[in-house]
Amino acid sequence: MLERKEQVLLTRIFRFSASHRLFMEGLSDEENFAIFDKCANPAGHGHDYTVEVAIGGEIDDETGMLINRIDFEKQAAPVIEELNYKWIDRDIDFFQENISTVENIGKYLWQKFTEIVPGRLDSIRVWENPKSYFEYFEEKQDG
Amino acid sequence: MLERKEQVLLTRIFRFSASHRLFMEGLSDEENFAIFDKCANPAGHGHDYTVEVAIGGEIDDETGMLINRIDFEKQAAPVIEELNYKWIDRDIDFFQENISTVENIGKYLWQKFTEIVPGRLDSIRVWENPKSYFEYFEEKQDG
Amino acid sequence: MLERKEQVLLTRIFRFSASHRLFMEGLSDEENFAIFDKCANPAGHGHDYTVEVAIGGEIDDETGMLINRIDFEKQAAPVIEELNYKWIDRDIDFFQENISTVENIGKYLWQKFTEIVPGRLDSIRVWENPKSYFEYFEEKQDG
Amino acid sequence: MLERKEQVLLTRIFRFSASHRLFMEGLSDEENFAIFDKCANPAGHGHDYTVEVAIGGEIDDETGMLINRIDFEKQAAPVIEELNYKWIDRDIDFFQENISTVENIGKYLWQKFTEIVPGRLDSIRVWENPKSYFEYFEEKQDG
Amino acid sequence: MLERKEQVLLTRIFRFSASHRLFMEGLSDEENFAIFDKCANPAGHGHDYTVEVAIGGEIDDETGMLINRIDFEKQAAPVIEELNYKWIDRDIDFFQENISTVENIGKYLWQKFTEIVPGRLDSIRVWENPKSYFEYFEEKQDG
Amino acid sequence: MLERKEQVLLTRIFRFSASHRLFMEGLSDEENFAIFDKCANPAGHGHDYTVEVAIGGEIDDETGMLINRIDFEKQAAPVIEELNYKWIDRDIDFFQENISTVENIGKYLWQKFTEIVPGRLDSIRVWENPKSYFEYFEEKQDG
């Protein structure tokens, strides 16, 4: 028999502008274009990224809020600001070891935000442009 | 072994404009600002809220529809209209006892819409502004 | 005990413009209007549809990508193009046997895209207009 | 010498869903496709149109409003509703004599709205889809 | 003979959330509802306002910019912040003497921004909600 | 006496993703940051640009169209594609001599599109991000 359990999520949306290039280091430009298409352009290119951070947990009976917005915004701001107006492949260590695909940007942001709301981060969604987004989340399962 | 089960959802989107104030009654303005930030402004402030109502169930073989839109729109309209162009803390009973956070607006709408489509309401999503939304849903679990 | 399992999804968004009419063949215009409202207008009407195709699986360690975009876009293009600038009830066989509700458009696109990414299609979302969307997906369950 | 004169405009936005076909009656399908591309598909196709109606004039000192919204909405509703959920080439007389390009839809709406706010209509903008819009307005000139 | 003169404009977009009520002080609730419809609700209601500030002038040859963004953002911030999360009829002096229609909000913002970029303000556009906006500008004329 | 003259405009919207850096060559990083703020980041950063190209003229009586879309799209595509997925300061000659501000991108696109529709280009609008856009146009004047 299926039982239903109440779930609540609050999502806050952030934006940052950055440039990146998709490429693998040992490969020629031709080989990189074959894998990454125009995203492999050697001089890079850029996007206005949108990040949706979904947080779960319990609603506080007294305040009626899932999280304290003031505290959360204060902690989230430097995570986003570090990426904002950067060439992330060059300016951010993580992307020197991981190709700056939207998939890896999602994984990077999951790591950053899970430290801010440990055990309560539900999902990270990253829009690379208005036609494509990536989601990273964890599914609950019986162990 | 994992089996996959077909799921279908239809989401209808509504909008309402309202004002509210976040505060706890026993507290001073200073204390309320410390918890609710500028949302505690004593004279209130407002938003254009967007509501996404997701409905599950079975697609009717004859009509090809999950719900009859005419019936649903007729029942949904007064729920939304009751909030529209109101100071919800003052004009709606529920928010005299529950702080008018987007979380509580979501819970309120869940109660209202679950009466319209009993057993078929899948989730309520409320956008407070273009940068923040709340979701309320129930997760199916083995009992 | 609940365990959490990492999940990743990449969603690509497509658009097509089409016309359709909702009606059941044996019924009079009056009967069709009673069920389908203004969507039953005999001469049809149209929409700009938006399609969100969500794909799951594993991120390729080498490329940092869930799917190869070049390959996927090439395979997706004819599926969307076949619907684009058409009266789908007349121009597409599937909708001669299935009423062209957004629900059935979702089912049709699930069939088409599941052939492109077999076993990896997570969900299809179809926006009929900015106020209504339909989702088709499969839920994993213990068998 | 240039003097600056205060100008005020209020724009109200409406939407309608419709289908249409671009073609010229004497021509073959091939000839029509050569001129109108995929818009010439014989069975038609559709769009969600957005209409922006800009009204000028003087702000009423007493009410602080350029137009009375209640009156205007009442008069605008039937103009939009007449196009909504229609194949405009077949259901609307004007488009039996004028090809239903977005240009001609703009001209049609100019005629309709100029009767509602005579001498005060500033411009009509019609979005055919999110990538294209047409504007019709009249420029003031020394006679 | 008509000559064409190059014109350039830079528009910066701001947002604020506020509540307001449309009413005239000597009138009864019934009379106010007759003029202002649901906007006359005595407890007020709210919106997420969007403001577009268009600035003209010359592009600086050295910097390639019409205005220095750092300076402008610094001066614009307090103008917007003063309205943000307020009941503007009560919290802002101007709207105690002027009905807080979107028309008057536009006039208020014109006064504020014309002090920041004297002689270079081209227009103020205020969106009250996604379906209605007001524009205030000055038209150049031969004197 | 003022006479009104009918005006018609058709606007087509394009998008491109690119990276750029705002800086002046003789200056130190500190000096560049003082003028261009975070846009001066030496490794560059990126945006999803939106371009609105407005075209005027006469509506063709036979086709009901201001321009032939097929021809125009064919000529516009390479102009946009040349900028797409590029670091424009490095990959495009014009921006080696002109700082890649949104103002200069607008001027560049004016030059490109005025060659495609000579005498009929009405304005170019470039959105650098969802909060800022630049417009370039020519105002008709008595000579």
Image: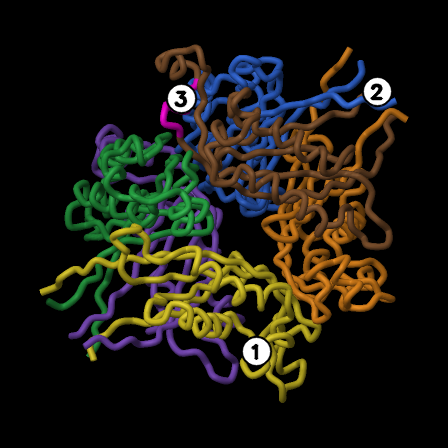
Chain colours: A yellow, B green, C purple, D blue, E brown, F orange
Circle 1: residue type:
Phe
Q: Is residue C50 left or right of residue F4?
A: left
Q: Which residue is mark 2?
A: E142
Most foreground residue, B143 or C84: B143
Above or below: residue F30 compared with residue C84: below
Q: Residues within 10 Å of mark 1 (few under 14, many from 20)?
A: some
Most foreground residue, A57 or C20: A57
For the residues marked 3 and 2, what is the alpha-carbon distance in whole angstroms? 42 Å
Task: Identify the mark nearer the N-term, 3 or 2.
Answer: 3
Q: Which residue is mark 1?
A: A95
Q: Nearer the viewer, mark 3 or mark 1?
A: 3
- Badge 2 element: strand
For the residues marked 1 and 2, what is the alpha-carbon distance in whole angstroms? 59 Å
Q: Position of residue F8 (x, y in %)?
A: 68, 30
* Residue pictured at 19% horizontal, 45% vertical: B114
- Badge 3 element: helix
Q: Which residue is mark 3?
A: E40
Please report the bounds of the magenta region as a residue range: E36-44
Circle 3: residue type:
Ala
Most foreground residue, C37 or B20: B20
- Whether labels 1 and 2 belong to a single chain: the reply is no
Above or below: residue C91 compared with residue B16: below
Tag 3–tag 2 contact (CB < 8 Å):
no
* Residue pictured at 52% horizontal, 23% vertical: E96
- Badge 1 element: helix
| Quarter occupied by the C terminus of chain E | top right
| Quarter occupied by the N terminus of chain E | top right
